[in-house]
Amino acid sequence: MARRQDQQRRSSIHDVASRAGVSAATVSKVLAGVTTVKPENAQRVFDAVEQLGYRVDPLASDMRRAKRRIIGAIMPEFESEFFGQMITELEGLAEQRGYTLVAASSRESEAREKEILARMHDWRVAGVVLAPVRNEHGPAAEFMKANGMTGVLIDRVLSDDAFDTVSADSAAASAEVARELIGKGHRHILVVGLGEQAATVRARLDGFRGAALKLAPGMRIDVVLAESDVGPLRAQLRDYFDACEGKDQGEGKGERPTAVYSLFLKGTLVALSEFRRRGWHCPNDISLVGFDDAEWMQVTWPAIAAVVQPVREIAGHAMEALFARIEGGEGPPQARLEPCRVLMRESVGSPGSGSHSGGGNRQ
Amino acid sequence: MARRQDQQRRSSIHDVASRAGVSAATVSKVLAGVTTVKPENAQRVFDAVEQLGYRVDPLASDMRRAKRRIIGAIMPEFESEFFGQMITELEGLAEQRGYTLVAASSRESEAREKEILARMHDWRVAGVVLAPVRNEHGPAAEFMKANGMTGVLIDRVLSDDAFDTVSADSAAASAEVARELIGKGHRHILVVGLGEQAATVRARLDGFRGAALKLAPGMRIDVVLAESDVGPLRAQLRDYFDACEGKDQGEGKGERPTAVYSLFLKGTLVALSEFRRRGWHCPNDISLVGFDDAEWMQVTWPAIAAVVQPVREIAGHAMEALFARIEGGEGPPQARLEPCRVLMRESVGSPGSGSHSGGGNRQ
DNA sequence: CAAAATGAGTAAATCGATTTTTCGCAGTTG
DNA sequence: CAACTGCGAAAAATCGATTTACTCATTTTG
């Protein structure tokens, strides 16, 4: 009914100006906090703003200025807790500084990543927080470089010669996982990963292997790395365990690993589902640690041990670095690593303790 | 090194115009696909665009036009799979139509919800997809109404007299859950919910109760509803089961429910963690069904039965309705309900079958 | 006391598009 | 031949701010 007229034109700076009896320029100055305005006029401007319910149009405002107060954020996905929290944090931080965050999901595609970036460039964003699909050497970072965009790379990166980077200290966390598992007596561990090209997967693998072989030089570390998708990983894992079981029978000695370390969240899920399929239970039949924590991991039985990434810290330092650059900060790019927490939960035990429901007869 | 000069001013429509030897207006028309331009000139424009790598500045473009090609999306949170998928879908759909999606999290706060909305109004968004914290009667919807904004309400809503609504058919799904549980022999069921004010919680509760009491009139349905936060719910649930156990001893008959139906995801987690604490296992000691599915639910042991919401459908129809309104569609607001799928998994069994690890001695 | 500096404010240019208006020119028509 | 029609394109207005340049007073300074 009254809808049509509700759709009134919002009042502009000129409406405020004429109501206050000053020029638009003066209004702009008052609102920007310039002090060279007569207090009386300033008050009249404030009054007019109040009466008209005036609010600056950020679009028009950004039009004139060189750096627009828009930040772009590109994440590989939004479905996981990690990136969900990340977006929430980034959005809050951007808002605090009066910026608007435009978020987009690259859906794990580098092609899409670049397209989104191009669109953000069209918007002339002041800066971009990019969590690349693979690593810092992808086409997206290249695009940013070529177009002189300012940005920060997070998560699946180590360091870059053009952009600041912020990520979890995967290597250190993985080393700690190695220490924990070896401390419990594990000497044959399977590491599961996806995306050999992802900077973090490599760091996690190397961190784990380095620490493990230092503590237990003779130990065995198997690795199952799928290239790009979760589907193949599932099959690879099945084949891997099939092979173990085969040897089991042949030699009468358990060739099956006593623990699995998954380098990423979906891998943890795939491992769990493979355990289910085989009727294995944690930690009696096999131990499990996953990189990336999730809320459900502590309520299931057993609770799943996990590496917790410091989302707040990553987001905070990423934004800090980004705004420093936006405001003209110079100097070589910084590569920042934030420490993780390793939560050892019930899914990890000592090998050979407890009853087995699996096929192998060990010890 | 070459960075500074990379930060070149991007070419504007005037650059294209002068290179093509026409006016800016002509360039605009060619790019908009107006046919009243001499083919020869059109070609020269295209060439110039190509050579300069020109792209329209969406900000400047939106400036002049009445409806800006920006869609706002406000979700209560980004951390869950549901809203993560929702944002992903919405973003994709907006992009398909040449719109930019600006997403923000109200972080389950109605105050913040309204603030975000005000900021989106400042941006003069063409439309808003709002998933309200509580229901359609909050201050945010009020704000939208008062300011003549066009929008669609989703998820925690039933119907509205000013906006189209799209949500999962919670009531029907809950009725199906009731049928399934009663079919398995359950006659004493606890329903767990949060936020009595949330439209969906009420619909789910009523849908469940209605169907259940119709099928098994004498059955017992207990309800534990926390008002606003998960913390209290945890305590309430503990008290509830403590009370059950107390009676257990006193009467020697199990007053403990044989199944729990959680009306929302976090409730499912809280229920699971309470089961853990008491050493109860699904489905032997108690059955569990939760509203909202999650990836992990099918890989844990037992797999958790859940109601799957049709995210794609909700997002799709929400955007459809929104764009219809943006393009001037009239008519009374539509309230749309999308059917859910109920996945019965291992967490549901028949009462009294299987061994018990809990305290009560039943049958 | 004249010249320079300062203060307070305004008109106009600008940002980069879109849209409306105007204009020139060619071809028709009365 | 004047008037009219149409077409294609240019010129100008517009969107809503910010910023620069400039105008008067008033005050300070040499």
Image (cartoon, coloured by chain):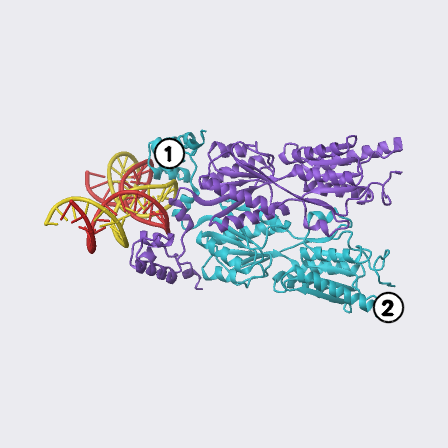
Chain colours: A cyan, B purple, C red, D yellow
Image-based side of A232 in relation to A150, left or right: right
Respond whether the residues carrying marks 1 and 2 are from the same subunit: yes
Chain where mark 1 sits: A
| Labelled disc at residue A240 | none
Q: Residue at x 81, y 69 (%)?
A: A247
Q: In which chain is the residue bearing label 2?
A: A
Q: How crowded is mark 2: few (under 14 residues within 10 Å), some or many (20 or more)?
A: few
Q: What residue type is labelled 2?
A: Gly
Taking the image as shown, residue A148 lies to the left or right of residue B15, namely: right
The quadrant of the picture occupied by the N terminus of chain B is: bottom left
The residue that disc 2 covers is A252
Residue B318 location, x and y as percent?
Answer: 54, 42
Q: How crowded is mark 1: few (under 14 residues within 10 Å), some or many (20 or more)?
A: many
Cα gap from disc 1 to disc 2, whole angstroms: 87 Å
Give the quadrant of the C terminus of chain B.
top right
Determine whether B275 is above or below A124 in the image: above
**Which element carries disc 2, helix, strand or loop?**
loop
Q: Where is residue A258 in the image (x, y as percent from the top left)?
A: 79, 61
Image position of C3 with respect to A161: above or below: above
User: Is residue B261 left or right of C2 when viewed as pictured?
Assistant: right
Residue B287 image offset from top left, x and y in percent:
78, 42
| Residue with the mark numbered 1 | A16
Of circles 1 and 2, the one toward us is: 2
A141 or A4, which is in the foreground? A4
Closer to the camera, A257 or A44?
Answer: A257
Numbered disc 1: secondary structure = helix
Q: In this view, does A4 lie above or below B306?
A: above
Q: Residue A6: name its quadrant.
A: top left
Asked whether the viewer can see residue A162, the reply is no
